[in-house]
Amino acid sequence: MNRRFATFLSLVLVMTVLMGCSQPETVTQNAGTDSKVVQGDTTGVTDTTVKVGGFAAQSGKVAPIGISVRKGFEAFIKYTNDNGGVHGRKIEIVKVIDEAFDPAKGLAASKELVESDKVFALAPVLGTPGVQASMDYWIEQKVPVVYPMTGIEQTAHPAKNNVFAVQPNNYDEAKILTQYAIKDLGKKKVAVLWQNSDMGKQGLKGVQEQVKASGGELVFDAAHDVGAVDFATPVLNAKAKGAEAVILYTTLAESVGIMKEMQKQGLTAVPLTSYVNADPVNIPKLAGDAAVGLITGGWVPVADQNNPDIKKFNEVYGKYIVGADGKPEAPNAYSTAGWIAAELLVKGLQDAGKDLTREKFIAALEALKNWNGIMAKDISYGPGDRRGSTAFYLNKVEKKDGNIVMLPINTQPYRLK
Amino acid sequence: MILAQQIISGLATGSLYALAALGLVLIFKTSDVVNFAQGEMAMFGTFVAFTLLTSAGLPYWGAFLLALIFAALFGAGIERIVLRPLAKAPLISVLIATLGLFQIINGVAGWIWGYELQPFPAAVSGAPINVGGVVFTMQNLLNMGVALLVMLGFFLLFKFSIIGVAMRAVAENRTAAKLMGVPTDRILALTWGLGGVLAATAGILTAPVTNLDINMMATLQIKAFTAAVLGGFTSLPGAVIGGLTLGVLENLVGQWNSQLQTPFAFGLIVLVLVIRPAGLLGTIQKKKV
């Protein structure tokens, strides 16, 4: 059996070596494609078409998100094409690659789209692993990337000429939550319970910087692992240090666990958390009473079904995305994100003019100031600014008529002062 | 006061590790197989209970009982369909097969029940109990009680019952046991059935804490492996002691450095194993010639 195991191991080794070799090969083969025409980069552009493509998990546990993102993106692109396209060009979605939320596959997908398919721009791109793995490659290739869907600050800090973030990143949002706790709620003693990941660390950094700016004090911070279940230690310490506000920079399951532990240990500080957890269905469902008082971030105003934009979104989406039962599908938060990516792409193509180049496209997006599309709202860029949305719409969990509900706090954008 | 609370909370979390570890040890003890799919069997059984509770509207204990029956058949079925044909295959193939089961059960569960977190009711509810400033819930007590009871039950089973003796015989030497007239196939199916029951019990008691989703056991199962190794992997009391130790250790280290909580706890375990390779309560198996 030992010998068999050795054979197995050597097989694995051989496979690893082979796979390791195949990647640099592709790079050298395609290294020549970078030579460009002098007046601008027209990769992926013809008189009648412009090619785009991206990646989003279509299998595995992130598939429900990835599939929705793709559908939202496709819906607005099909709608645009059916209305004549942009400057006579139809937008061709070459492919949305299933990278299965895997960093290596995400980078491979970026390379495939840029080098083999020669797309004009990358969209939609979903997921922290793929975005993180691809970032250096994107910068090197100067390919426009429209709305990398992740909360990591690398999408916006430092600004990259060709990468246009839309949703706020952990760092910027943590500053907003801290400012709100200190300035608006008057809770000067802040604690942070952060996930031992990029998300948590960037959130912690934002809080650390903002407590100083807003005149508060960071009394306690502690990390926890993804999937942790025992929050007694951090909650007890936050309580012992007299925390008045506890910022939870972590994902849904852990946030629920922390709020339940706070309730159990009688820690009455105000919990605040990222827009990632601004889930009006799951927060009350999972945390129940323990969630009452929670403040969540948010970067789109809560949907008002009578709003004409929302009506139009539902109508167009339902027209192009039909379910297995033949009925129009209803969009969700993730298909909205896909839709926003498509809207921003189309806006850039329109503003770039008839003679499309990547440079003109980038300049067009850079010129956007508080731009509102159908679902894309309040998006701004500028020289050295690639953040996209900096407006926040905070929510609060309350008990109302015996039900636990998440209600909007502000209807006008809340910003960093 | 923080220290007392950390120990109590650590014991509560540790009982979850122990519950998950017991099934691993039971199956390993009898069949020499490290069942990587144990956590997924727990998750699947819990989803069955969840469906019985929500869709079929059964009362809690009814759903619990039916889920355990399902889990027993599920475990025995896995033994019959997957493990028995592999009886003569090298151990590594069997391990890979259980890894395959892990993926299959996880994927099928996602396909049936989706990927959203679901709340799962606690077996016992009520306000937390406060004893001199140390807070714990009824569910915490129940988890620990069940872990200890299961441990004791199986200890007695192995020691005194005829089935237990047969199980030990199968573990010791399958061929010899067969020659002695022990129905080894049935004993193995029974072990896996019991392993399934233990898995579902662990899942149902864990789900109120983690919430229910297809990856609910991912982290816990690694901790359970650690607990089992720490306890000696062949010892049921070892699994419980290993689980409780790990739970408390994590909290104590967390007080000192939260980022090093997991690495340091595991570091200590490696240290224990270096000093005592068989684990806390394990015995070193002498290879028979």
Image (cartoon, helix red, strand yellow):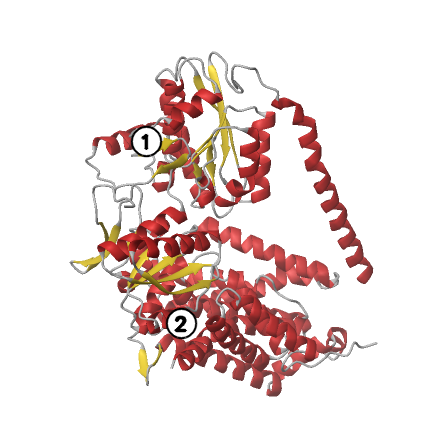
Type of amino acid at the residue the image marks with label 1: Gly
Q: Residue at x 52, y 75 (%)?
A: B249
Mark 1, Cα crowd under 10 Å, few <14 / some 14-19 / many 20+, is some
Q: Which residue is mark 2?
A: A232
SS assignment at label 1: helix
Q: Is residue A120 above or below residue B93?
A: above
x and y, in percent, of residue B68 in the image: 47, 69
Q: Which residue is mark 1?
A: A318
x and y, in percent, of residue A8 in the image: 76, 54
Q: Chain of mark 1?
A: A
User: In the figure, is residue B108 to the left or right of A108?
Assistant: left
Image quadrant occupied by the N terminus of chain B: bottom left
Compute the Cα span from label 1 to label 2: 46 Å
Q: Quadrant of residue A82 in the image?
A: top left
Can residue A379 be seen at all in this image of the molecule? yes
SS assignment at label 2: helix
x and y, in percent, of residue A356 in the image: 45, 16
Furthest-left residue in view? A401
Mark 2, Cα crowd under 10 Å, few <14 / some 14-19 / many 20+, is many
Please determine if labels 1 and 2 lie on a single subunit.
yes
